[in-house]
Amino acid sequence: MIGQLSRLPSKPQDPVATLDHGIYVTVEWTEPEDNGGTDITGYVIKYSYKDRDVNKYGELPVDENTTNFQFTHQLNAFVSYQFAVAAVNAAGRGEFSEFTNYVLTSSSKCCYNIIVMLASRSTEISIFQCTQSAV
């Protein structure tokens, strides 16, 4: 009997990045429609940020089988990031999802966010209010 070969999984769907307490960013996504014929064993999150008008990228493996991840110390303050997610199975890493909208991090000591509804879309505006004691 010949076993079925596994394929790469399809890309995860609907990634969303939200800012939590200034510098923490939570990325959530929906599992891929096609797991490639074998269980999803983890994900890889690609993040992009601008540095002097040049896009730079980093990747972070998420070994557990989850559909969300919170960046708690991997990101820098006052930088705009966007995120994409790829699923991993026994055959390897599949295609990355589309990137999320950019999220601007801040310091956890001096930021709060306001969500503004404009026409039929929402826009997030970050307002920074730092005190002299905030470092």
Image (spheres, grey):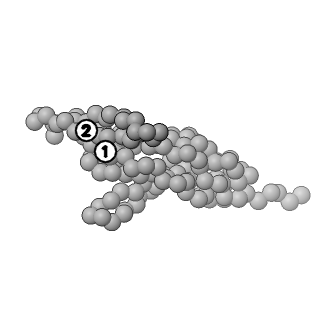
Tell me how far mark 1 sits from mark 2, CA to CA: 11 Å
**Residue 58: image x %, image y %?**
41, 58
Q: Is residue 22 left or right of residue 5?
A: left
Q: Is residue 54 above or below residue 86?
A: below
- Specify the farthest residue to the bottom: 54
**Residue 73: image x %, image y %?**
33, 44
- Specify the farthest residue to the right: 1
Residue 99 can be seen in this image? yes
Q: Residue at x 50, y 41 (%)?
A: 28
- The one nearer the camera, 76 or 124, is 124
Q: Amino acid at mark 2?
A: Ile
- Specify the farthest residue to the left: 132
* Disc 1 element: loop
Residue on which the image places disc 2: 127
- The one nearer the camera, 57 or 88, is 57
Q: Amino acid at mark 1?
A: Thr
Q: Residue at x 32, y 46 (%)?
A: 104
Q: Residue at x 36, y 34 (%)?
A: 115
Nearer the viewer's eye, disc 1 or disc 2? 2
Residue 61 can be seen in this image? no
Q: Is residue 104 left or right of residue 96?
A: left
Residue on which the image places disc 1: 105
